[in-house]
Amino acid sequence: MLVAAFLRNGLGLLVPLAIACTIYLYLYPFFGGCAFPLSSRDSNEAFEATKRLHWPYTELESEPDHVPTQLAPFRLLALGDPQLEGDTSIPTVILGTFPHVFSIFDHVTFRTEHWCFRERVRQIVHDIVDIFFEDIPWFLESLRKRFDLFGNDFYLAHIYRTLHWWSRPTHVTVLGDLLGSQWIEDDEFDIRGHRFWERAFRGGERVPDDVAVWPKHEYELAGMLDGSETEDIWTRRIMNVAGNHDIGYAGDLTPERLDRFERVFGKVNYELRFGIPINDTDVLATLHDDATNPESTRLEPEIRIVILNDMNLDTPAKNTTLQDATYSFINKVIGTSAAVEYSGIFTLVLTHIPLYKPEGVCVDAPFFDFHTPEEGGGVKEQYLLSADASKGFLEGFYGMNKDPSAAAGGRGRKGLILNGHDHEGCDTYHFINQTNGTDPAERFWEVARWRDAQAQGLPNLTSEGVPGRREITVRSMMGDFNGNAGLLSMWFNQETWEWEYEFANCRLGTPLFWWFVHFLDLGVIVAFLVYIAVTIMGAAGVDVDARFFEAVEWSRRRFSQWWNKNSNRAAATTQNGHAKMNG
Ligand SMILES: *[C@@H]1O[C@H](CO)[C@@H](O)[C@H](O)[C@H]1NC(C)=O
């Protein structure tokens, strides 16, 4: 039973390895210590709390699915730039399969025009060369690419599914560049949309249009952050942001591109407000009320999520109607914001292109490229928003001011900006020094890496004349960037009457490991099936070893026959050649 013994020993080695790798891959957030931060900001404690959610023997006060109140009430799973590729990255789709074979056929069958026979032969020889140096490499590359794309969908799906299951977000966002190209045809757009919803983000849902509405003075909350069953819908809905590869930059954005995006992925501009239950009547009595408590600056706590298409904030835009729509949306957001003096509302902006920052702060530096005047002259590409557009964010959305004598000292409204675009990710702090110089007009927005800003204590200087806001560019979830995901927690501090937040990253690691584990598992399953077959055959009285060695011997003989025949022929050809030369 040599064959059986060999398989048994091989499986004895491979099965533990396969199990270990599979467990590691499928529980990667556990091994990576990933968890939504807690209000204590202690990452170990957060990890323990998340672990307890999955420990079947944990005693929970109410229903089994009840999330312990220790977890932050708002937990956003933020994913950057999945960029689903498709037919545009497969050479044979663009160039055809073996195009030069068809071309030869045309030349040979006189379907082409040539001015003389020599030219026809020249073209045929040319095409034969191209079969070897173009068609075959393209064909192989296309096969590899197709396989790669197939795996990539599942790699992204693995991140979404595993992390969603492990970390229990209350909300999910994809921060733009859902797709890999804005130039694709409608049918390919639909195919990728289908892959997005059915494969990569399976179980996810588009935010309905009647929920994704523009800001109003008399608005309805999109939900309560109370962990109740009715809020489960928000764990499945995906707040999709439009990116340049989805709808194009300002110079390419057309109503057609916008429409197909909104049809498949949801609206590009909208607002969602989430409240948090406060039941303590003493606390409720401290809230602002025009009639009974006009002195109070406390508003009912709300997280205001603004999903913004910032593709056409900068000029020139191809379609000014669409640009006006973006501007009027922003004005609407600003117009419906509470006055800066009030506290309790947190504005979370989800958008794609990051704010302006000078070279060297993040990986992407300021960069603009424009179409030629003949092409329309619009924005062709940009890495960051312009300084003016960024200022609009900070002074418009957040109402911060360079002048300390402005309303509420120019400190503005609380909030945070999340975006994508720069695949490497970046974490920064934008601030303005209100004591810099005597003339407010000379004061300017500065930006520092969040770590450096913290080291200098800048975020604590908000009430000392240096207001600022943090901007987190979430690192891409693509394999090249190790399958990153952002975990943003938010909770309400009743002492200060402000929302607080903490952000963490979680990485899956290289797609090579993902591939390796699945190939290994497949290999083990095949080996196991062969082992069972061998055992059954052995039990049925078949001498498997003898059959196996016969088969090996037969193959060896066939191979050496083939080898000898070929080498003899080669030798004969060489001899003939020598003979001719010598003769
Ligand atoms: C703000 O400007 C003042 C005056 O130039 C300077 O003394 C102070 O250090 C600046 N603060 C920061 C945080 O840059």
Image (cartoon, rainbow, N blue to C red):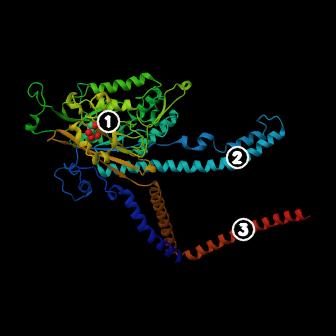
Check disc 3: other Cα within 10 Å, few if <14, some if 14-19, many if 20+: few
Residue 562 in the image, given as x and y percentages of width and height: 72, 67
Horizontal placement of 494 versus 188: left or right? Answer: left
Q: Which residue is mark 3?
A: 563
Residue appearing at x 60%, y 40% in the figure: 94
Residue 342 in the image, given as x and y percentages of width and height: 18, 31
Give the quarter of the image for residue 355. top left
Count the labels in the image. Answer: 3
Residue furthest to the front: 438
- Comes first in the chain, label 3 or label 1: 1
- Disc 3 to disc 1, how far (Cα)? 69 Å
Whether ligand 1 has any atom under 8 Å from the Cβ at mark 2 is answered as no
Closer to us: 86 or 254: 254
Q: Which residue is mark 1?
A: 349
Whether ligand 1 has any atom under 8 Å from the Cβ at mark 3 is answered as no
**Amino acid type for the residue under numbered disc 2:** Asp
Residue 263 in the image, given as x and y percentages of width and height: 41, 31
Closer to us: 148 or 538: 148
Indicate the quadrant of ligand 1 in the picture.
top left
Residue 415 in the image, given as x and y percentages of width and height: 27, 37
Horizontal placement of 527 versus 491: left or right? Answer: right
Closer to us: 24 or 375: 375
Residue furthest to the right: 583
Evaluate whether residue 235 shows in this view. Answer: yes
**Amino acid type for the residue under numbered disc 1:** Val
Whether ligand 1 has any atom under 8 Å from the Cβ at mark 1 is answered as no
Disc 1 vs disc 2: which is toward the camera?
1
Q: Which disc number belongs to residue 130?
A: 2
In the rendered view, would you say 19 is above or below 401?
below
In the rendered view, would you say 344 is above or below 477?
above
Pointers 2 and 3 in contact (C-beta within 8 Å) = no
In the rendered view, would you say 541 is above or below 87?
below
